[in-house]
Image (tube, rainbow, N blue to C red):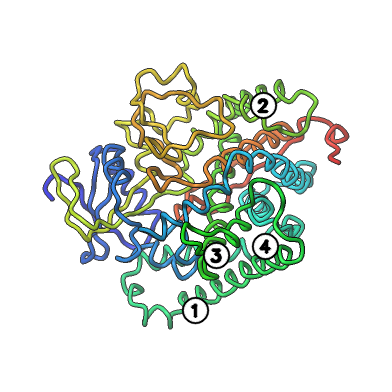
């Protein structure tokens, strides 16, 4: 493809992102081609114009041709993240009520309860001055949240130390899945299953499936004994267990487990990434942290808990979180598989080609985001949007498939490209849990900054590690300082 940047991808995802970033910064392309070990070519998009073409198409997730989606199937099954066609349409339709406005509203109480424990677990570090790697703590809190809210499961996860076996399994499974994508010899199933990585992946998948099956079985027993709740809207797992389509057919046991696996992974790990990097930004940009603190302290006054109404009154915090997710996209990229030729400007890509969507590159494209390496939350405030494309901010979707934030009066009409800000993808396959995620993030960050002042550790390397989600190679270590006397923060 003449005029299209091309390069060779080796087996280091960090180097891949670094090289792609250099290409985007220097050549400012909309598409690119990369070769894996010189013989396997893939196509990529790194500009919202190209992303829009792809997201508005019916191209399926690229698991049939290889790539992360194919290998995720062994772990999370054929759930909403991976499935396509009529199965995806049916299951999406059945599961959408689980994220209805009336379901989300009482979850704020759960967010606060989980955050109470989270903040108490950090008290030791604030008192001692010892640095804490915040990501594992946040991951436990978000896993606790998704299990309570979506699956009515309370396992006191945050009391089980800094790591939980499931969180560890997810971390390793994410790494192993991406590692396999980057090693051509592991594309052959026969070779992979006898490798050390293949054996480890199977063992971790078995544990993850066992954990999911236990949650499902426990809920089935409760429903059998007590019956369905009388409330109008059911929780996510109750919908999985009882929903039937227009033909009276419910989900199979395999479908139920796949959706549970999918939502436990997506509902805790991606949110943990967004929260953890937002906390990093609090420490990295102290002036912005104080702006957020001022807003929250004036809003909550003497109250410790965030209410549903409060979530609509946090414009600076909301802008801060959005800019954090622009800088550090929780999901660095997604992919599609073309089932028919597709045109990107003057370039026609044939059917059967695997296409990567580099969300990270889109969020840092200099033609879309001036001063893209500068942290500017005001990008997402009303006074700073007049000269941008109306579709430049779509964290969870745009167009006919856009779902308004359940608690986001700070949402405004943007004059930017609809596909220039897509931390949780876009289009008809946007994140079904978008409102759930944003509300949870805002509760945890607001409560944290209300109680603790965050700073970074001098000399620590905060290098990004873009696996399936955005992690940090050496952890996100922060130092916490109590803003008030300890006695003022007694939590009942």
1 or 4: tag closer to the N-terminus:
4
Q: What residue is rendered at 70% in x and 23% in y?
A: 299
Q: What residue is rendered at 36% in x and 54% in y?
A: 15
Nearer to us of marks 3 and 2 is 3
The picture quadrant where one finds residue 373 is top left
The local crowd at label 3, few if under 14, some if 14 to 19, many if 20 or more residues have their Cα within 10 Å, is many
2 or 4: tag closer to the N-terminus:
4
Find out whether the residues at labels 3 and 4 contact each other: C-beta distance under 8 Å: no
3 or 2: tag closer to the N-terminus:
3
**Residue 461 appearing in the image:** no
Secondary structure under the numbered disc 1 in the rendered image: helix
The local crowd at label 1, few if under 14, some if 14 to 19, many if 20 or more residues have their Cα within 10 Å, is few
Report the residue that reaches farthest toward the right. 487
Residue pointed to by mark 3: 256
The picture quadrant where one finds residue 102 is top right
Rendering coords of residue 4 (x, y %): 17, 46
Rendering coords of residue 361 (x, y %): 35, 42
Find out whether the residues at labels 2 and 4 contact each other: C-beta distance under 8 Å: no
3 or 4: tag closer to the N-terminus:
4
Residue pointed to by mark 4: 164
């Amino acid at each position: 493809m003449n005029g299209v940047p091309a390069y060779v991808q080796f087996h280091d995802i960090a180097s891949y992102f670094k090289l792609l970033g250099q290409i985007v910064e220097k050549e400012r392309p909309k598409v690119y081609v990369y070769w894996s070990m010189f013989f396997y070519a893939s196509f990529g998009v790194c500009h919202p114009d190209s992303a829009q073409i792809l997201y508005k198409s019916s191209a399926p997730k690229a698991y049939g041709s290889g790539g992360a989606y194919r290998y995720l199937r062994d772990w999370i099954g054929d759930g909403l993240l991976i499935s396509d066609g009529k199965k995806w349409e049916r299951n999406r339709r059945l599961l959408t009520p689980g994220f209805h406005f009336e379901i989300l509203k009482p979850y704020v109480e759960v967010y606060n309860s989980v955050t109470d424990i989270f903040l108490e677990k950090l008290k030791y570090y604030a008192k001692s001055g010892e640095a804490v790697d915040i990501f594992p703590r946040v991951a436990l809190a978000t896993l606790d949240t998704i299990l309570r809210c979506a699956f009515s499961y309370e396992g006191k996860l945050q009391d089980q130390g800094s790591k939980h076996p499931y969180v560890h399994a997810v971390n390793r499974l994410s790494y192993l899945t991406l590692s396999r994508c980057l090693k051509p010899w592991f594309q052959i199933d026969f070779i992979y299953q006898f490798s050390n990585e293949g054996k480890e992946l199977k063992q971790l998948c078995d544990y993850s499936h066992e954990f999911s099956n236990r949650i499902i079985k426990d809920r089935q027993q409760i429903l059998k004994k007590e019956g369905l709740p009388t409330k109008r809207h059911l929780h996510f797992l109750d919908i999985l267990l009882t929903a039937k389509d227009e033909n009276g057919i419910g989900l199979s046991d395999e479908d139920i487990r796949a959706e549970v696996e999918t939502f436990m992974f997506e509902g805790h790990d991606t949110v943990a990434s967004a929260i953890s990097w937002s906390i990093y930004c609090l420490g990295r940009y102290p002036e912005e942290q104080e702006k957020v603190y001022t807003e929250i302290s004036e809003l909550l006054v003497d109250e410790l808990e965030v209410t549903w109404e409060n979530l609509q009154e946090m414009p600076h915090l909301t802008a801060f979180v959005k800019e954090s997710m622009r800088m550090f996209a929780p999901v660095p990229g997604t992919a599609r598989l073309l089932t028919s030729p597709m045109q990107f400007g003057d370039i026609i890509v044939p059917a059967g080609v695997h296409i990567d969507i580099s969300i990270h590159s889109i969020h840092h494209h200099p033609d879309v985001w001036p001063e893209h390496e500068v942290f500017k939350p005001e990008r997402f405030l009303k006074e700073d949007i007049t000269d941008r494309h109306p579709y430049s901010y779509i964290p969870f979707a745009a167009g006919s498939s856009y779902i308004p934030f359940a608690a986001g009066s700070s949402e405004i009409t943007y004059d930017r490209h609809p596909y220039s800000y897509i931390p949780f993808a876009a289009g008809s396959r946007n994140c079904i849990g978008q409102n759930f995620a944003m509300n949870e993030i805002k509760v945890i960050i607001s409560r944290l900054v209300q109680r603790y002042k965050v700073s970074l550790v001098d000399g620590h390397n905060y290098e990004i590690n873009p696996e399936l989600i955005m992690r940090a190679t050496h952890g996100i270590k922060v130092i916490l300082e109590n803003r008030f006397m300890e006695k003022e923060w007694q939590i009942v």
